[in-house]
Image: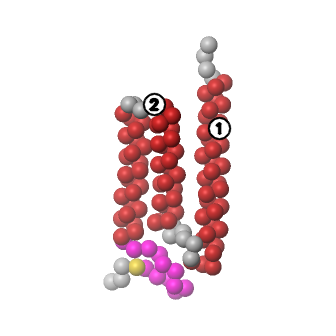
Amino acid sequence: MSDIHTSHDGASHGSYKSYIIGLVLSIVLTLIAFGVVMTGSFSVPVMMVTVVVTAVIQVLVQLILFMHLNTKAEGGWNFVSIVFTVGILGLIVGGSLWIMHNIHINMMLG
């Protein structure tokens, strides 16, 4: 039984190794973010940066290892998908941080 699954057009669908690496990385990144927040021993900016960075890395890990997006397959359309994903990710993360900052400033008591 082959370790790499290939469709009729020659595109790779990943291997067991890539799925296991993706799973382990996803679990580790989740545990890092969870641990930083639950211990409470870090300052708020450090916690926020850690959670945002681990979330962005986890999105990229899942896109590359589970969704198999790369710059070589399907005539460059996967690269366009990656660029679009990075743009949307920037808008969502940046917009969420901006909204949370404004809510924090406007809801301060005193």
Q: Which of the two residues, 103 or 41, is positioned nearer the viewer here?
A: 41
Percent position of residue 14, x then y: 44, 74
Q: Residue at point 63% right, 79% down?
A: 75
User: Which residue was labeled with disc 2?
Assistant: 43
Q: Is residue 14 magenta?
A: yes
> Magenta span covers which residues?
5-16
Q: Is residue 66 placed above or below 73 in the rendered structure?
A: above
Q: Residue at point 51% right, 38% down?
A: 48
Which quadrant of the figure contains the C terminus? Answer: top right
Q: Is residue 82 magenta?
A: no
User: Which residue was labeled with disc 1?
Assistant: 98
For label 2, count other residues whose C-alpha is less than 10 Å away and answer few (under 14), some (14-19) or many (20+).
few
Q: For marks 2 and 1, give the one nearer the viewer.
A: 2
Q: Left of 91 or right of it: where is 42? A: left
Percent position of residue 109, x then y: 60, 16
Amino acid type shown at disc 1: Trp
